[in-house]
Image (cartoon, grey):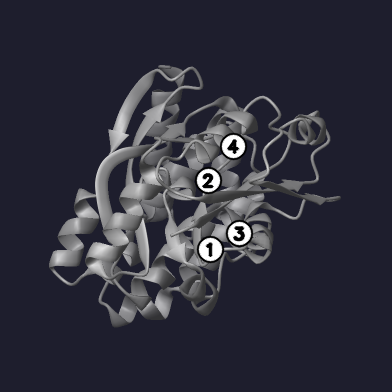
Amino acid sequence: MPVSVVIPTRNRAHLAPLAIRSALEQTNIRVEVVVVDDGSSDETPGVLAALDDPRLVVVRRDKDHGEPQARNTGAQAASYDILAFLDDDDRWAPTKLHRQLEALASANADWSVCGARIVTPSGQLLGKGSVERIQTAVQQRETLRLFLTTNQVPGPGSSLVVRRSVFESVGSFNPSVPLFADWDLYIRLAAHGDPALVDAPLVDYVQHEGQMTKDLSEGWDALVGFRERYGNHRSAEDVRVSDETVLWWVASRQLRSEGLGPVLRRLWQARVISQPSDLVRVSRTLVGVAAERLGK
């Protein structure tokens, strides 16, 4: 079964070719690779033009519309009924798509995710991410409850394989929550049905400084909007969400550039902190993040 691989990219001329190559080198699978250049101002257009492969389709956008919208644009341009998504700074094991398609067929499922290795750009192993907790939730029929609590997919932007019809029916990626677009989509997919899982590290989830450049105010606005968006679902499922989990994720990408004081002020302005007890609780979390960052 052929697969359309969607890779959004912007100003990653030094990284995107590695991601593209890992998609083109998938074994036992017919692929097309749709790269959406989201308004790059570096050498990316020239680098993409130099890649000579008939399976490669490049969609050029003049302005930066954001990663979620770039992914949706790529999905619209794709030819095949199975979609897979790969971030431009990540890479795949050669058997990734084949193993996930086997899992889809075996489980009669509409979407699939897999495990990941957490690595540096040079490939040094930092850790591994498993889908074991998702497997447990599937067995206990609590998949939606789990995803309403937290995003458990390692390397979330590069793990998903999904049937196009289901991707379109649940609403594709939501541009209004750019920092949580993966998680947002996984919640809607979990409401649709259980995933097929491959608990093997088939994604290289690359950690690098460029991941910490997202706008902080956008992050807090997205956090507040995300909580409001799924508040009723969480109440219906009797889900209690730990905000510290989300704050840790956002703050770990922002503290190095902003510092602790500005982060706390933004939280207050975004109404994530609304009373003194919140300030103490969140400060402790963020101090832990700052200590971790300073130790690296």
| Residue ID for mark 2 | 86
Front in this rendered view, residue 119 or 146 = 119
The Cα–Cα distance between marks 4 and 1, rounded to whole angstroms, is 34 Å
Q: Looking at the rendering, which quadrant does residue 69 occupy? A: bottom right
**What is the three-letter code of the residue carrying label 4?**
Ile
Which circle marks residue 20 in the picture? 4
Instruction: Give SS at disc 1.
Output: helix
Q: Give the camera-side residue of 50 and 266.
A: 50
For the C terminus, the image quarter is top left
Asked if 262 appears above or below 220 in the picture, the reply is above
Sequence order check, earlier mark of 1 and 2: 2
Q: Are marks 3 and 1 in contact (CB under 8 Å)?
A: yes
Which residue is identified by label 3? Answer: 221
Q: Dots 2 and 3: beta carbons under 8 Å?
A: no
The disc, 2 or 4, on the residue closer to the chain's N-terminal end is: 4
Circle 3/circle 4 CB separation < 8 Å? no
- Which mark's residue is nearer the viewer, 1 or 2? 2
Q: Are marks 4 and 1 in contact (CB under 8 Å)?
A: no
In percent of width and height, residue 143 lies at: 26, 67
